[in-house]
């Protein structure tokens, strides 16, 4: 684990958990001096996991850099809902790039700072899964290969949500999108397609790679701060729920993101220079069906003609992740 897990036992209490902690252990969001990097006034959908993830990640990065941070942001949901011209909800130096070149723009910013001798200012690039896994993959691979001093964050909502919920290279198998409809003998997105970007990043053997979800604020903040302690190329893949594209309740964004990790479909881990160094163990394992059922993009698996065979294939993927990253908590792990 990247941070010391903190357990609260407050049956019947309404005490805010952060108040029980030493100030150094509290989250950035509990600090009245937080930067509010993504502030009020944006136009994200109710329950948008991307807005939540960006606020968590960028506020943590601002704290880690003493508010000396510049962001390059690809076209996509995050850019569209936060900067409708001539307005902006960003409270840091922020540059809008094209859909596929945010890594290159972030690299250029880092190079300009280096020429000016500004080693105190750090750079973050950010995009959705479309701008990271598909359109921006070439630029991102180049950034990794050159080991440019940039932290790149992918806010993965598993489709091109801003343009109508089309399939991306991060869309999971069997998920329904506008371009992977729930029809035919293999409804939804095809198995065996897409890309595992965290593993691709690890293959470049860059200094730091991590995955996280909006369900664990402490983990997101710890990984961002850990990433900012390195120089060179770093990558954070953050799972963010999309109520519109996933067809889930807006109030369930965090709980569904948690189920993604607890069933094993989204492994949470850290890696340095191509080697996994830590993985977040599953404390209470759930079957993948528990994660799939609340989402309308998987409704075709549980309708009038259910598809337990497809659910079984998804369960096999989760089982493989659990074995691959050693995600099951043992008795010794839980003893502390």
Image (cartoon, rainbow, N blue to C red):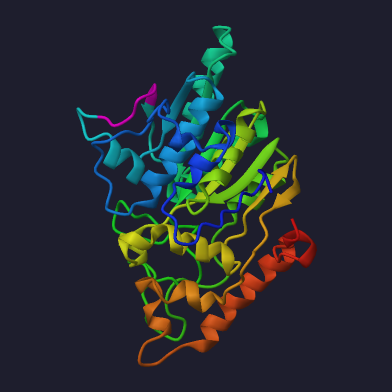
Q: Where does residue 296 sit, x and y in percent of width and height?
A: 35, 73
In the image, is residue 198 above or below residue 226? below
In the image, is residue 334 above or below residue 66? below
**What predominant SS class does the magenta segment belong to?**
loop
Q: Is the C terminus in the top left, top right, bottom left or bottom right quadrant? A: bottom right
* Residue drawn at x 31%, y 51% as measured from the top left: 162
* Residue drawn at x 39%, y 70% as measured from the top left: 180
* Residue drawn at x 39%, y 51% as measured from the top left: 49
Q: Where does residue 252 sit, x and y in percent of width and height?
A: 37, 63
In the image, is residue 59 above or below residue 173? above
Q: Residue furthest right?
A: 332
* Closer to us: 198 or 146: 198
Q: Residue furthest left?
A: 86
Q: Quadrant of residue 246?
A: bottom left
Q: Residue furthest top?
A: 116
Q: Quadrant of residue 301?
A: bottom left
> For the magenta stretch, what is the residue range?
88-94
Q: Quadrant of residue 295?
A: bottom left
Apparent side of residue 43 relative to residue 328 in the rendered image (left or right):
left
Q: Where does residue 179 sit, x and y in percent of width and height?
A: 36, 66
Q: Where does residue 108 sit, x and y in percent of width and height?
A: 51, 22
Residue 333 appears in view: yes
* Residue drawn at x 19%, y 27% as measured from the top left: 86
* Closer to us: 286 or 158: 286
Is 89 colored magenta in this rendering? yes
Is 35 colored magenta in this rendering? no
Residue 58 appears in view: no
Apparent side of residue 251 relative to residue 86 in the rendered image (left or right):
right
Apparent side of residue 124 relative to residue 3 in the rendered image (left or right):
left
């Amino acid at each position: 684990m990247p941070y010391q897990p903190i357990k609260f036992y407050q049956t019947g209490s309404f005490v805010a958990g952060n108040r029980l902690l030493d100030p150094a252990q509290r989250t950035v969001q509990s600090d009245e001096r937080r930067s509010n990097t993504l502030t009020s006034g944006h136009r994200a959908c109710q329950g948008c996991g991307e807005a939540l993830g960006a606020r968590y990640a960028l506020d943590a990065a601002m704290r880690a850099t003493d508010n000396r941070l510049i962001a390059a942001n690809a076209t996509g949901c995050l850019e569209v809902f936060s900067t409708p011209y001539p307005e902006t909800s960003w409270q840091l130096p922020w540059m809008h790039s094209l859909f596929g070149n945010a890594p290159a723009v972030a690299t250029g910013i880092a190079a300009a700072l280096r020429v000016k001798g500004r080693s105190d200012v750090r750079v973050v690039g950010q995009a959705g899964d479309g701008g990271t896994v598909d359109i921006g993959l070439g630029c991102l691979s180049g950034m990794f290969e050159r080991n440019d001093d940039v932290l790149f964050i992918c806010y993965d909502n598993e489709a091109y949500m801003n343009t109508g919920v089309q399939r991306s290279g991060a869309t999971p198998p069997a998920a329904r999108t506008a371009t992977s409809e729930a029809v035919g003998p293999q409804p939804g997105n095809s198995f065996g397609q897409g890309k595992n970007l965290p593993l691709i990043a690890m293959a470049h053997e860059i200094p730091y790679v991590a995955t996280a979800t909006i369900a664990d604020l402490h983990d997101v903040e710890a990984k961002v701060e850990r990433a900012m302690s390195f120089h060179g190329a770093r990558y954070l893949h953050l799972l963010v729920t999309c109520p519109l594209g996933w067809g889930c309740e807006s109030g369930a964004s965090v709980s569904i993101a948690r189920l993604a990790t607890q069933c094993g479909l989204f492994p949470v881990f850290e890696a340095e220079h191509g080697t996994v160094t830590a993985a977040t163990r599953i404390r209470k394992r759930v079957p993948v069906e528990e994660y799939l059922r609340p989402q309308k993009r998987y409704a075709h698996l549980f309708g009038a003609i259910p598809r337990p065979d497809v659910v079984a294939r998804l369960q096999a993927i989760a089982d493989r992740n659990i074995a691959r990253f050693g995600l099951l908590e043992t008795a010794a792990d839980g003893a502390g």
